[in-house]
Image: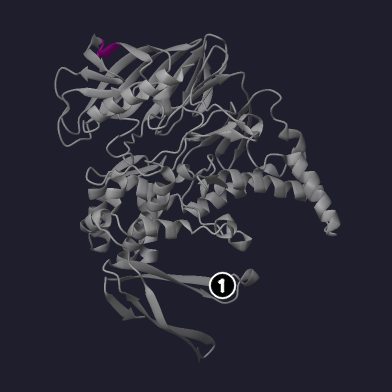
Amino acid sequence: MENYTKSAALKRQVIETNREFEESNFPSVIKSDIDLIHKGRTIEATAFMIIKNDNDVQLDQYLFSLNPGLEVSSVLKSEKPLAFTASGHIVKVSPGKPLLPGESDTIEISWSGKILESFCYPDYSDNIKEYKYRIQMVNVKKRQVFLDKDYVLLTPEAHWYPVAGLNYYPSNPARIKIDFTTFSLKAKSGSGLNIVSQGLPSESGDYTCFSAGFPLTGLSVAMGKYVADTISVDSIKFISWHYPGNDYYRKHFEELKDTLPNLISGFMKDLESGFGTSYPFSSLSLVEVPVNFFSFSRKNTQTRAEVQPSMVLLPERLSTLQQAGFEKRFLRQKKQMARNNQVITDKELKVRIFNTFIRSTFINGQNFRMINATLVNEPTRYLLGPSFYFFRNNFYSDKYPVVNSVFESHLQKVNTPAPPGGGPMQMGGNISDNDRANLILRDISFRDLLARNPSPDTLRVVLTIKGDYLFNLLRMHAGITEFNEWFKKYLSENSFTRVNILKFNDDVKKQFGFEFYPLLEEWFTGKGQPGFLFTDLEASQVVVGERTRYNVTFIAGNPEPAGGLFNLSFRTGGGFGGRGGGQGMFSMAIQGGRGGGV
């Protein structure tokens, strides 16, 4: 285990090396076939890679990031060695001749060594007192990597294979480079451990082979005494990888064995309906990992390392998940129902408990906690939202590198009703996330805020409101229904593809006849927030034949210098439970210092 002093020095070195290379051009990795051998506390590996130059300029050298505990032994092209050097964790390969824009190349890189864990999150201290991870009353040492003779867990954050990009951009922490890479893995463990990775396993001699069958944003591997339970639902294979005896929940839910496929199907359909798109992978693996595995929140994405493409890393025995005490919850709710004279079968109650666990863990779970006397809402680390955008789509811009984070923040957001009483934020006297973001942006531009390196929680709420504004602007010009239907199809057509924001602007112009890219400068650098005033609200009702029509008028004003945009929603009467039989919505923009009637 690295001591604290060495860890802090390594983090400083990683940041300075990243600062040196953050404006450099990297290739994109299109395909990577990795052969991996586990040898106790070290690994040996070779990657057969196809790379492409997606830049506007030629590449005179190929740059890759590799964990500084690993050392490259050779780089080959057509079985002939290529010259290479290392600068910290950056490997520089000389290809012999420049790689022109749009061209591809094939190389083979071999490396070996150990993994330095402190590399993973260089902008976070390893001081256990600064970023606390509490389990009950115990402050736990956080781990991001496991590499021992008895257990292995390597995620993309460790850069255990060559990555064509940086893990942190010091000048703009919200920046990110994503490659959609077709991976295959051929691995074996010297300790005879069972191997888990993305895709379905197959055996080839002493090796276990994985081929996900779809491009991934990164590759993870776990090795241990794993056993697997598998169930196929609606063409998706669900796999539970766990240690023997840790599936205590099996006994409790035995009665749901015949019902489980329908419950899982309903859960996935709710997810797909909420995100407006289908689950893009053919499998979903739930992998049990040590309880002290912990990922930090990052400023360039909402996605946590506990969620990987087609894989979720869950704590051993589900021990830290709030809704996982199934037997106790069952007995407690049973007693409560008896006191309230409620009648329900044991099976129906177990279905409720199962659904509550699934939804709170994977769909809309929240974690309210106090940080520096402020109540902060941190979503649970296991939400499946990234499967529907971050692991499938990517928009990038050289001028506005934060654009993908903004898209992600808007598209992965799940709207859930506030709990009774307004929720912990309101009961504690705290303002909402939207109000807090508006206050932050009142005196500072989005660009200047990013330059100040804000906290992850501050960045999260600001990204959300800036994303909402940008998409509402698009919907206002294109039409809400028209844009939503077109954009849903657009995301599907560009799955596992990096899309330049300029190309997206051209496609929007072609479809709807307007350009939004010129508006990004004000969106990114403009200061101030609108302040809307609504007066003279009147509503009237007119019956025409058998139909009732409504007319709503009001005056909306914006006395602030900055222009703004607001949405209006109308719900018609009727519907189950008084929730309304339908909903209409439109957006309206008002320039600064103006008003208008609606």
User: In front: 521, or 462?
Assistant: 462
Residue found farthest to the front: 373
Instruction: Characterize the magenta stretch by its predominant secondary structure.
Output: strand
Residue 124, percent from left and from top: 42, 32
Q: Is residue 229 visible?
A: yes
- Residue behind mark 1: 581
Q: What kind of element bears circle 1? A: loop
Left or right, 506 with respect to 464, comes to left
Left or right, 487 with respect to 130, comes to left
Q: Is residue 344 visible?
A: no
Q: Is residue 98 magenta?
A: no
Q: Is residue 518 above or below residue 143?
A: below
Residue 469, percent from left and from top: 35, 60
> Mark 1: few, some, or many residues within 10 Å (few <14, many ≥20)?
few
Look at the image and give the residue range highlighted in magenta.
Answer: 74-79
Q: Please report the residue visible at 55 percent of the width from the left and 56 percent of the height from the top.
A: 425
As shown in the figure, which amino acid type bears the numbered disc 1?
Gly
In terms of image quadrants, where is residue 104? Answer: top left
Left or right, 520 with respect to 535, comes to left
